[in-house]
């Protein structure tokens, strides 16, 4: 038996999502937005602490645990196919070389995107991981369909021209929008606004990354400039994001030090934004952020988070 399947059986966890049953006279999309008011368990690249990130094994394990969202980064191949892969280059999580966008789907399918995990995590190694394929978005949808919710990032849109159109086209083809199955996230505000123009029904999450300002000691800055420093952010700044997004995805730490506060979380929520924090794997940090009242956490170890929130 595969190690990850054995883990599912050992934990005795169920298959399905944690979303509440739809309320009477509520559309599935409205229900999705309502569910965002409850705490969300977001499986970062699937159960990536237990299996190769973004692999079918990682997604199946997270889905079996009953996570609220399967989180994936979406990129475009040289021949226009959408694939689930985080890095811009292939070396870290496959035996390929170069930029993923320079390769056709057929070339990517020939790669081994699983053996690296066994080499880096010998205590978690599983022979079944060797030879894992880079997945297309269609393969993910064909596997889980309407039985899962998806938290998809338009990754490096400057390297993936047309990714927004391709993504919306596939979401519509698989009826993932009106059925309340998908959130779209990006650090790139322009990419999110493009998604909004293509289909205004898709709920969006603005990603932000706060880190020290190299030119101003003691001050934080946001990577893309989409908001001011957390110390300087105003209600108007949050409302500007809430004009097109339903939530904010933010880091909590930089180099081990907090970059946001409980007050930041509350202020964002007061201005109509859910706050989802990435990527939190430590149980004490999970509990700390839950105590702050955050609306969800991205984690490589959804099993830990589920156990903490049950």
Image (spheres, rainbow, N blue to C red):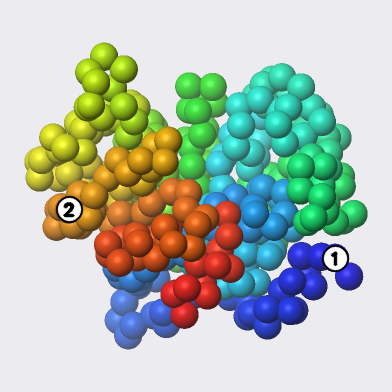
Residue pictured at 90% horizontal, 54% vertical: 127
User: Is residue 116 shown left or right of residue 166?
Assistant: right
249 or 188: nearer the viewer: 249
Q: Which mark is residue 113?
A: none
- Badge 2 crowding class, 10 Å Cα cut-off, few under 14, some 14 to 19, many 20 or more, is few
99 or 180: nearer the viewer: 99
Furthest residue in direction bottom, as rendered: 24
Name above or below for residue 78 compared with residue 118.
above
Q: Is residue 132 visible?
A: no
Q: Secondary structure at mark 1?
A: loop
Counting from the top left corner in percent of width and height, residue 39 is at 37, 68
Q: How many marks?
A: 2
Residue pictured at 17% horizontal, 53% vertical: 263
Name above or below for residue 54 compared with residue 163.
below
Residue pictured at 63% horizontal, 42% vertical: 84
Q: Is residue 218 visible?
A: yes
| Image quarter of the N terminus | bottom right
Counting from the top left corner in percent of width and height, residue 257 is at 36, 41
243 or 131: nearer the viewer: 131
Report which residue position mark 2 lands on: 263
Report which residue position mark 1 lands on: 2
User: Is residue 230 shown left or right of residue 31?
Assistant: left
104 or 112: nearer the viewer: 112
- Badge 1 crowding class, 10 Å Cα cut-off, few under 14, some 14 to 19, many 20 or more, is few
Counting from the top left corner in percent of width and height, residue 209 is at 36, 35
User: Is residue 111 shown left or right of residue 179?
Assistant: right
Counting from the top left corner in percent of width and height, residue 181 is at 48, 62
Work out whether mark 1 precedes mark 2 in sequence or the reverse, and give the earlier one: 1
Q: Secondary structure at mark 2?
A: helix
């Amino acid at each position: 038996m595969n190690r990850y399947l054995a883990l599912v059986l050992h934990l005795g966890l169920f298959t399905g999502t944690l979303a509440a049953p739809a309320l009477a006279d509520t559309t599935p999309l409205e229900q999705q937005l309502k569910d965002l008011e409850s705490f969300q368990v977001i499986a970062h690249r699937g159960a990536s602490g237990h299996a190769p990130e973004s692999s079918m094994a990682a997604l199946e394990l997270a889905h079996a645990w009953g996570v609220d969202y399967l989180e994936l980064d979406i990129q475009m191949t040289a021949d226009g196919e959408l694939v689930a892969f985080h890095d811009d280059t292939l070396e870290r999580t496959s035996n390929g070389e170069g930029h993923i966008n320079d390769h056709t789907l057929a070339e990517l399918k020939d790669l081994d995107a699983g053996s690296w995990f066994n080499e880096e995590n010998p205590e978690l190694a599983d022979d079944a991981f060797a030879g894992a394929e880079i997945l297309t978005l269609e393969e993910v949808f064909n596997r889980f369909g309407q039985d899962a919710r998806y938290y998809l990032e338009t990754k490096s849109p400057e390297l993936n021209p047309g990714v927004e159109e391709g993504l919306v086209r596939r979401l519509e083809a698989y009826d993932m929008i009106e059925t309340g199955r998908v959130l779209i996230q990006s650090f790139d505000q322009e990419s999110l606004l493009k998604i909004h123009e293509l289909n205004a029904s898709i709920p969006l999450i603005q990603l932000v990354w706060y880190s020290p300002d190299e030119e101003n000691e003691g001050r934080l800055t946001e990577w893309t400039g989409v908001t001011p420093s957390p110390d300087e952010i105003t209600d108007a700044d949050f409302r500007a994001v809430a004009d097109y997004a339903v939530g904010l995805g933010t880091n909590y730490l930089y180099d081990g030090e907090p970059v946001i506060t409980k007050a930041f979380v509350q202020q964002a929520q007061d201005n109509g934004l859910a706050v989802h924090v990435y990527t939190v794997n430590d149980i004490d940090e999970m509990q700390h952020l839950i105590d702050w009242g955050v609306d969800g956490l991205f984690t490589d170890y959804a099993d830990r988070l589920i156990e903490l929130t049950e």
